[in-house]
Amino acid sequence: MTDLRRALKPAALCGWLCIGSLLAGGLLADDIDQEQVLRLVEQGRILPLQSLIDDALQRFPGRFLEAELEFDDGRYEYEIEVITRDGRVLELEYDAVTGTLLDIDIDEDD
């Protein structure tokens, strides 16, 4: 990976979080803003979003659509939405600290 790509990665990850949040119709849960997300990642309190996007796409090959970070029931959770190669839209819920896949929802709105 080039130095430029490595330097841009944290900013791009935060950008994806914000874009995903806006597309989902609101701000990040519990007022978690872009700077707070970056700080949590830099402090090692949560995993970088890209690592979980990579896991999601390895499990369900397709394309990343959007992501949100929420603080729910005392823990940080990423919600990652992907569209699989066969056109299914999946929402994957990950523990943002451990990377554990917690839940999979399949969007049945066709």
Image (cartoon, rainbow, N blue to C red):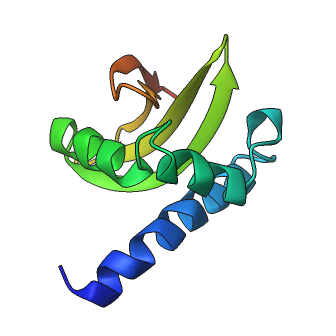
Q: Nearer the viewer, residue 80 or 89?
A: 80
Q: Is residue 110 visible?
A: no
> Does 14 sit above or below residue 77?
below
Camera-side residue of 9 and 58? 9
Q: On the rendered structure, is 58 left or right of 4?
A: left
Question: Is residue 81 visible from the viewing direction of this image?
Answer: yes
**Residue 88: percent from left, percent from top:** 35, 38
The percent position of residue 63, horizontal first and vertical second, equals 32, 56
Image: 66 above or below 72: below
For residue 3, side relative to residue 69 (left or right): left
- The image shows residue 95 at horizontal and vertical percentages of 44, 24
What residue lies at 80% left-to-right and 47% top-to-bottom?
A: 27
Q: Which residue is farthest top?
A: 73
Name the residue rendered at 43%, 49% in the picture: 49
Estimate the x, y position of residue 5 in percent, counting from the top left. Answer: 32, 82
To which quarter of the image does residue 47 belong? top left
Q: Residue at x 69, y 58 (%)?
A: 34
Q: Quadrant of the N terminus?
A: bottom left
